[in-house]
Amino acid sequence: MLTTVIPQGYAPLLNLYDTQKAIGLLKRLFEDDLGGSLNLRRVSAPLFVEASTGLNDDLNGVERPVSFDVPDAGRDAQVVHSLAKWKRLALHRYQFSVGEGLYTDMNAIRRDEELDNLHSVYVDQWDWEKVIAPRDRNVDYLKSVVSIIVNALANTQATLRSVYPQLSVLPLIDREVSFVSAQELEDRWPELSPKEREDAWTRDHPTTFLMGIGGALKSGKPHDGRAPDYDDWGLNGDILLWNPLLNHAFEISSMGIRVSPESLDEQLTAARCGHRRELPFHRALLAGELPLTIGGGIGQSRVSMYLLGKAHIGEVQASIWDPRTIQACREAGVILL
């Protein structure tokens, strides 16, 4: 079934060449703003990790990592799904102090992704992580960091509009963030699916941080899946922007304050993942050897789509698509890279 939808009358605001230039510009602008505002240093990151370390992000627990052997090293490797756990270990190994952090380009392959306007098997993110003090493990601190990220996005958009006036027809990012929990949305619209709740709320609150993702709600079901071994389910969330072109809530970032030894233990039990306690990363975390952190991933292609007014993620990144999507885009005049 075709899951790609091209809005009627859609036409790109920038041609192919200007799109490529604008992507390069917005990435530089956003990286500089984000790094300066959160005191983050750029580091290099792995494309793959050893399968035995427990460092790979298992997402919802059903996605298959791309795996291969490294004969000379005598090890099996996995292409990363994200760097959620690797970053925390890196902060420990590089001896970062409280208030200091890192960011990096994360490139991943998610072979089981369902392809549509927003999803590709190729994933590119700004992955970032910052060391925090015990007193910072609270909702107010989480909200303050969310506001910094939203301001960096809005600042980037303002500069892009001055360079490319064609983009001025797009709505400005609302710097005023609406904070709401997944439980509040379920209480308000129990008859709707989680994604329908996101749409219903974000339509009237165009910049939203949806909090509390991963743990079971009163219904007994989580709003969405989240691995039990990086975010604290009570101190995390997604940054959503209303996308009028696609008429949906548009997830820009998944982020949160990371698990403490105590919350990791609780979440592993709740997720029935007790066997992970024996993996090297989890043993170190449970022993209190890793720093307390906050972090997340910010989609580079998602940000590029939103700020450039693109209808399909294939307009801002090169990937592989099914024949029906290719045909639908060709007929609509949408150029897939």
Image (spheres, grey):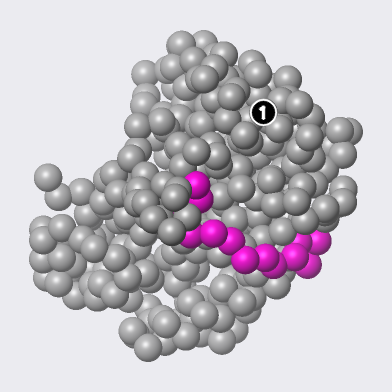
Quadrant where the image shows the C terminus: bottom left
Residue 277 image position (x, y, % from top left): 60, 23
The residue under the point 71% across, 32% down is 284
Quadrant where the image shows the N terminus: top left
Residue 217 image position (x, y, % from top left): 52, 16
Residue 30 image position (x, y, % from top left): 63, 69
Quick check: is 189 in the magenta stretch?
A: no
Classify 240 as above or below 198. below
Is residue 261 left or right of 65 when viewed as pictured?
A: right
The residue under the point 42% across, 87% down is 18
Residue 263 image position (x, y, % from top left): 69, 22
- Between 55 and 77, the residue placed more toward the observer is 77
Asked if residue 242 can be seen in this view, the reply is no
SS at mark 1 in the image: helix
Quick check: is 44 in the magenta stretch?
A: yes
Classify 315 as above or below 266. below
Q: How many numbered callouts?
A: 1
Classify 23 as above or below 146. below
Asked if residue 45 can be seen in this view, the reply is yes
Is residue 243 left or right of 12 when viewed as pictured?
A: right
For the residue carrying disc 1, how many other residues have a C-alpha within 10 Å: few (<14), some (14-19), or many (20+)? Answer: some
- Which of the 4 quarters of the picture holds residue 211? top right
Give, as a single range, the part of the protein colored magenta: 36-50
The residue under the point 87% across, 39% down is 133
Q: What residue type is labelled 1?
A: Arg
Residue on which the image places disc 1: 283
Is residue 107 left or right of 138 when viewed as pictured?
A: left
The residue under the point 65% across, 50% down is 87
- Between 48 and 149, the residue placed more toward the observer is 48
- Between 36 and 199, the residue placed more toward the observer is 36
